[in-house]
Amino acid sequence: MDAIVAEELRKHYKTVQALDGVSFSVREGEVFGLLGPNGAGKSTTVRILTTLTRADSGRAFVAGEDVAQHPNRVRRAIGYVAQDSGVDWEATGRENLLLQGRIHGMFGKDLHARVDELLELVGLQDAASRVARGYSGGMKRRLDIAIGLVHKPKVLFLDEPTTGLDPEARAAMWVEVERLAAAESLTILLTTHYLEEADRLAERVAIVSKGRIVAEGTPEKLKRDLRGESVSVELAEQNGRVDEAERIVAGIGTEVKVDGQVLRARVPNGAQAIPVILGALDDAGIEVASVTTARPSLDDVYLHYTGRDFTTEDEGRA
Amino acid sequence: MTAQLFRQTGWMVVRQVRNLMREPIWIAMMVIQPMLWLLLYGQLLKRVGAQGQSSGSYIEFLTPGVIAMNAFFGGMWSGMAMISDLDRHVIDRFLAAPTVRVAIVLSQVVRAAVTAILQALILLLVALALGVRVHGGVGGWLVVFAGAALLSAVFAGFSHGIALLMRREASMIAAANFVGMPLMFLSSILVTVALMPGWIRAIARFNPVNWGTRAMRNAVMAGGDWGPTLIYLALLVAVAAATALFATWCFRAYQRSI
């Protein structure tokens, strides 16, 4: 059975069409990534699936229950770690967890044992009796995840779990999520705008752009579907001839992208294309500092499916 | 469902009381402010306020008024806690869990009502020291506590609804003042009904703040003849239920917008 099914979800806010027909499904026990820039519709999708808000049209099922018909059944089956921390700052870590457990109808020894277990799992046992106001960003995030897990949910929603964390805390969080997925045998829906995060954590990925899913599959499959390789050429000097070099490369490869003195392009076969590119640039008298080829990354996949560079779209909408 | 409602409301009240107990300044303000009102207004309006009343000192007249004012402003501002919970996304976390919506509102209403009762107690004790007597006896004390709790509850429900609709501190402050100040001056908190112009007297009849004030004033200054007092309290119960439902309904508006 699929743990999450979304069918043709649509939602608009005033003039903005946030979701324009989103469909996907997540198998039980799977870690599934929704990948896309801010404003693409990831969080809206999660808010509909977690019953926080309703879709204008379309249907969704989580843990076998319709989110619109039986929201409370869905709520009992899910853990939700929102993009913004939901920690009560004035309460201690332990108090935060106890209240969440009580909302889920837990009590007594079972609840306390579960809370102790989770505090240890996320490494907050020493800070458990301190008011959360004094926690670091990483600690609050880990507490958020523990809060989402108190009632042993079947499905865990992690909305941008590492946004706002420094690289070290982010790497630690990845290890955490991987461990949890195994230890609690959870279905996890993860949203992220970090390509490497989706690549690292998700077994399958859907790329979201402008309220639609534009590609879906394992990270490996998405990269494989993008036949060919990416070539990057670094020009030798600041000679103002980048435009001319771009024109030349565009005649050989596709999806050419310029980043300062570096040109990137996609070619069917790197080994064949490199001599051609170098020859053409040499003919034009443009000196080259280095050339590399690489198998496509999710970055290239994103560019391919949306026609936009990942990072620039992100900045434009944030 | 009902058991769940009481349990959740209870634990959320625990959360709020515990969090407030960690704010020493809040506790100090809660205790000192009502006393300040009583002493300030008592001095300022000593000569004019008591005109048109048959018996008792102005401070005796004023004590139930200040208790009412305190209770209803306390309720009116209590929605700020909702704004803070919305800002911190605590509400979203509750809403994605099997939380009974009414429990979130009720816990805030109960917190406001308990605060109002504590402040009423403090005010009565200060007033006793100033020579005021509660002529209604034990029943009078109970009416004062009930009146304070209900007035606070009425406006706490209203305030939380507004908080869910506005979601901004500045808008919330503006709305609370816009509604609160007129309600205070369209009531007999500071002056007797006899001193009011006819049109204010007419409006005051429909003002919940005035209902609570009159119920409590009867309990302090006269006692006995509880009929009208009980009607006022019953009206406040009805309005408190209505505003709590209004606030619960506002969760829908909030959820539509996110």
Image: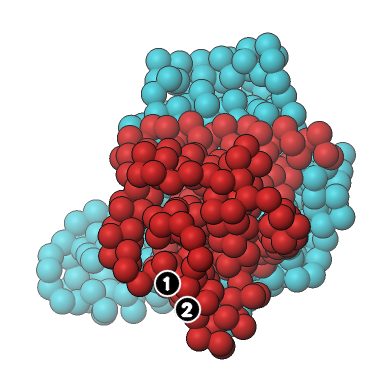
Chain identifier of the cyan chain: A
Residue A234 located left or right of residue A73: left
In three-dimensional space, the C-alpha distance between marks 1 and 2, rounded to whole angstroms, equals 7 Å
Q: Is residue B200 visible?
A: yes
Residue at position x 35%, y 72% in the image = B48
Q: Quadrant of residue A226?
A: bottom right
Determine whether, in the image, residue A183 is placed left or right of residue A288. right
**Picture quarter with the N terminus of chain A:** top right
Task: Say which amino acid is labelled 2.
Answer: Leu
Closer to the observer: label 1 or label 2? 1
Is mark 1 in CB contact (under 8 Å) with mark 2? yes
Query: Badge 2: few (under 14), some or many (20 or more) residues near its Cα, within 10 Å?
Result: some
- Tell me the SS state at disc 2: helix
- Residue B51 got which mark? 1
Q: Chain of mark 2?
A: B
Horizontal and vertical percent position of residue A216: 67, 55
Residue A82 picture location, percent across and down: 55, 47
Q: Which residue is mark 2?
A: B195
Residue A44 x, y percent position in the rendering: 62, 61
Is residue B180 placed above or below A66 in the rendered structure?
A: below
Please identify the quadrant where the C terminus of chain A is shown. Answer: bottom left
> Both on one chain, marks 1 and 2?
yes
Residue B131 found in image quarter: top left
Viewer-side residue, A98 vs A195 = A98
* Chain letter belonging to callout 1: B
The tint of chain B in the picture is red
In the rendered structure, which amino acid carries the disc numbered 1?
Gln
Q: Nearer the viewer, residue B49 or B57?
A: B57
Instruction: Name the residue rendered at 59%, 76% in the picture.
Output: B204
Which mark identifies residue B133?
none
Which of the 4 quarters of the picture holds residue B15? Answer: top right
